Every structure is written in C-alpha cells, then in structure tokens.
Amino acid sequence: MKILHTSDWHLGHMLYNYDRTKEQMAMLEQMARIVEEQKPDVFLLCGDVYHTSQPSAAVQTMLTDGMVSIHNAHPQMKIVMTAGNHDSGSKHEIFKTPWRALGVYAIGQLEKENLDEHIIEVPGKGYVIAVPYANERNIPDGFFQKLLDRVAERNTEGLPVVLTAHTTVKGCDFTGHDHASEYTVGGIDSLELNQMGEGYDYLALGHIHHEQFVHSGKHNVRYCGTPLAVSFDENFPHSVSMVEIGKHGEKPNVERIEIVNPHPLVTLPTEGLSSWEEAKQLLEKFPDDIPAYIRLNVEIDDFLPVEATAEAETLVKGKQCRFCHINAKRKIAAQGDAKGLTVQEFQSEEPVEIAKRYSEYAGVNFDEELESMFKEVMDMVADDSRNEK
C-alpha cells in the first residue's frame, strides 16, 4: 500500500495580518502534482485542515477546490481527512455524504460504539484506522487497541495496517511550537506511545509541525510535519511523506517530498541577534525582487526606538518582501544591574531562564545542582496541574 501522509495545513492562517491564500493555493497545487506523479492508494490528511474552527466561506471553498483537484489527479485513490484540534469536529462531518462520492472520508468525531466508522478498507491494499483529535479525557481506555483488534479480525490476507492520530506523543521534537514542553504541545497533553496500541504497521501522526520519526524501535511512527511554516520559528524544511508498505509486519519505506513556499519566512540575521542599526542595514540590503516575510531579531539595551516599526516599513517599500515583526531581546544584564522584562519577553522565556536572571542579579551561583532542583519543582507543579484536570 502506498500512502501520501500530510497534516496541519492550517488553511486560512494569517501571518501578522498578511493573507496567505496564494501560498496555500500553491501548496494545494503541489499536492495535486505529487498525487498525479506518485499515484498513491491513500491520501492521509491528519488534522488541522483549517487554522480556526470557523473558517471563512472563501477558505472552505479553497479546500473544496483543492480536494477536487487532488481527487482528479488520481480518481482511484481514497482520501482520508480527519479533524485536528484547530478544526470543528462536528462541522468537519457536515458534508460527509457528498464527500464520499469523491472517495473522501471526512472523520471529525470519535465513534465510541460504532468502531467501524473509523476503519477504511482499501480493497487488496490494506486498512486505514482514522482517528481524529479528541481530548484525552474523552478517549475510552484501550480505544486504539480495540480498533486495531477489530482490523486484525478482518485482515485475513495480511495486508498493511495504518493508524492515524492527531496528538502529542511523548518524546517528539516540538521545535517551532510556542509555549511547549515535554508534557504539553499546542494544548494537547503528551501520550505514551504504548497508549496507541499494537498491531499497526505505520502510525501517521499530525499536530507537531517538525517532520520526524518518533522512536518506537520499528521506525514506523511519524509526524509528517506541516507543508507550510506557520511561524518564523519553524525554520526547517517542510514536506509531505510518501510511505510504502509491502505487507503486514514489514517496515515502511518513507520518502520525503519537499513543498516549496513561494513566499518563505525569513529571519534577519539568519543566526543570533543584531543591533537595531545592523538590522536596518540587513533589511535595506535584502533583495528587492525576492518575495518573503521578514522578521528581525534585535538585541536591545532597554527599549526599541518608538519609530522602529515605521522605519522598517519604510525600508521595504518597493520591495517584494513584507516586513512582519521585530523580535527584540534585551542584553543579558551584568551582575547587580538587572533589567526588567517586557511582557513579550516574559511570556517567551522559559521559567528556568527567568530564575537564572534573578540569581545573577542576586549574586547567587545558579549551578547545575540548583538548576536540577528547580526543574524537579517545575515537574512537580506540572504533574499537580495535570492531575487537577
């Protein structure tokens, strides 16, 4: 069975009030071309189809047109589209019946009793167990295993079995996600991999934007990542995953196919921080004919000049790039000369870094032992918070 694995399209996403429709349409066109060239048996879209649960009519039309093009690129292919935490599960299924005419299976909510609603058979090729996002509290104990056992009863020919989920799996690399930890990413608590059950040949995951394998010992648990960056911190390649599985029990073969963004997200300088004057020079020298969104990483002593944003916007006039944001970071203060944090800085700082700043100001040596004790306390607080939910 050959599967195109993608997720986290976030259609309708705005970047600092800039409309990204052209980029998203270019991404959908690339999806259709890949399907036409590769001719997969199954197209998996594992959640976060939209960026909000209330997408505009124009954004919904973009998805519909995109799906029709993807279907037409290989009409024999089944398309499985599950809801993510950014989607409305109930609205995801409104057009469930007409979608089926195009071979699209739209699955938005858990069917706790009728398990067969989550099982899609691809005759002669394999099985897909499609599970949308659901709060962990609403997932019955052993739910994934029950689905896998149901498929095992039907899979008398030893065909490949693919399980999908939109969740955080413990041990994943959450680079690029704001306010994330090993316990929670994007508001979704981490699951242990063994909670996903046993018996699948490939676990197709959505939610984490950095494409990766999650260690399972079998090289068969994968986040495909988002095809378009949603934030400037997602400074890594974006792609879809083409997966081939010979038969049940065999290791999947996975190929990355990169998605090209015609309007990439660019941070200046590319590494580290610059002074405000240096940042302005970089922005002024940025080529006039390269479409891009620009973020400036600037180190400051105290505050940016009041006119900083206006200066940056003036410097990009006549260029094809779009200025988005100045990411200002204060210089690390000398001992006894602590500076206050802006609200933005405070929200983006890890608690341990704030503790280090205070220790430096107080003249306390924040050594490895003290850091270890601090993290232990933070873990205890996180555990208490989860137990209260």
Image (cartoon, rainbow, N blue to C red):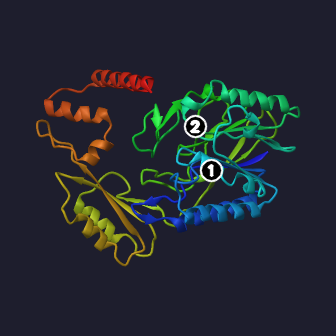
The amino acid pointed to by label 1 is His
Q: Categorize mark 2 by other alpha carbons within 10 Å: few (<14), some (14-19), many (20+).
A: some
Return the residue at label 1: 92
> What kind of element bears circle 1?
helix
Residue drawn at x 71%, y 63% is 68
The reply to whether dot 2 and dot 1 touch (C-beta < 8 Å) is: no
Q: Categorize mark 1 by other alpha carbons within 10 Å: few (<14), some (14-19), many (20+).
A: many
**Residue 219 seen in this snapshot:** yes
> What kind of element bears circle 2?
loop
Residue 83, how many percent across, how many down?
A: 61, 46
The total of numbered circles placed on residues is: 2
Residue drawn at x 74%, y 30% is 148
In the picture, the disc for residue 129 is none
Residue 220, how many percent across, how many down?
A: 67, 36
The amino acid pointed to by label 2 is Ala
Residue 256, how many percent across, how many down?
A: 64, 50
Chain-order first, disc 2 or disc 1: 1
Is 8 positioned to the left or the right of 161 in the image?
Answer: left
In the depicted structure, whether residue 24 falls above or below residue 148 = below
Relative to the observer, which residue lies in front, 292 or 145?
Answer: 145
Tell me the quadrant of the picture where the C terminus can be found: top left
In the depicted structure, whether residue 17 falls above or below residue 191 = below
In the depicted structure, whether residue 171 falls above or below residue 126 = above
Is 291 positioned to the left or the right of 216 in the image?
Answer: left
Return the residue at label 2: 134
Residue 114, how many percent across, how many down?
A: 74, 34
Is 97 positioned to the left or the right of 206 in the image?
Answer: right
